[in-house]
Amino acid sequence: MIKEFVESWDKHKDELKDFFKNNTQSNYSDYEDIVKLLFEKVINVDLEYDFEKFDTENIKVIDDGDYQGTRILILHKNSYQPNISKYVYTHTYYGSCSGCDTLQAILDWNYDKKPNEQQVEDLMQLALHLLQKCKYMEED
């Protein structure tokens, strides 16, 4: 777990929660969407310079599964030719149905609707777990 990320979560989690509440589920129907929102609404917010912020437009996803497996999501800071210490990753396990996949169970295929209160709480829990799993590939 990255201390600065947890501090940002404590300060900015309400912005992420508001986004979930006020937008249809189609805006975050994939784990990559959740990670992108997590970095845009929580982690990048207090970073002053562009080169300190994480590039949320070019998230790399490793997924060697089929109907189930592990997704590894990799981001790097917006620096020219970032070195290994500028990369962060998180991961999640997924399945092929709402019985074995956390995100599918939360959204229950209602992508054109806004979530109810329980779905918002579950999405926040999922985002927190993704944040807690974040690690730098190599320490500075």
Image (cartoon, rainbow, N blue to C red):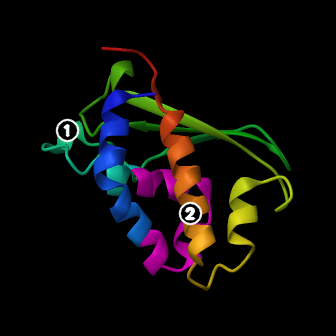
Q: Residue at x 35, y 37 (%)?
A: 5
Q: Secondary structure at mark 1?
A: helix
Report which quarter residue 36 is drawn in: bottom left
Which residue of the protein is positioned furthest toward the bottom in this rendering? 113
In this picture, residue 56 sits left or right of residue 45: right
Which residue is depicted at the point 42% across and 52% down? 38
Q: Is residue 88 above or below residue 41?
A: above
Q: From the image, tell me which residue sits under label 2.
A: 121
Q: Position of residue 82 (x, y in %)?
A: 31, 28
Give the residue at mark 1.
51
Give above or below for 128 relative to 83.
below
Residue 139 among magenta residues: no
In the rendered image, residue 102, in percent from the top left (x then y), is placed at 72, 54
Position of 77 with respect to 112 (left or right) is left
Residue 124 image position (x, y, % from top left):
52, 57
Q: Secondary structure of the magenta portion, mostly?
A: helix
Q: Nearer the viewer, residue 22 or 116?
A: 116
- Residue type at mark 2: give it: Glu
Q: Residues within 10 Å of mark 2 (few under 14, many from 20)?
A: some
Q: Residue at x 55, y 68 (%)?
A: 120
31 with respect to 54 (left or right)? right
Marks 1 and 2, how far apart at CA: 32 Å
Badge 1 amino acid: Phe
Above/below status of 62 relative to 121: above
In the rendered image, is residue 43 in sight? no
Question: What label does residue 133 carry, if any?
Answer: none
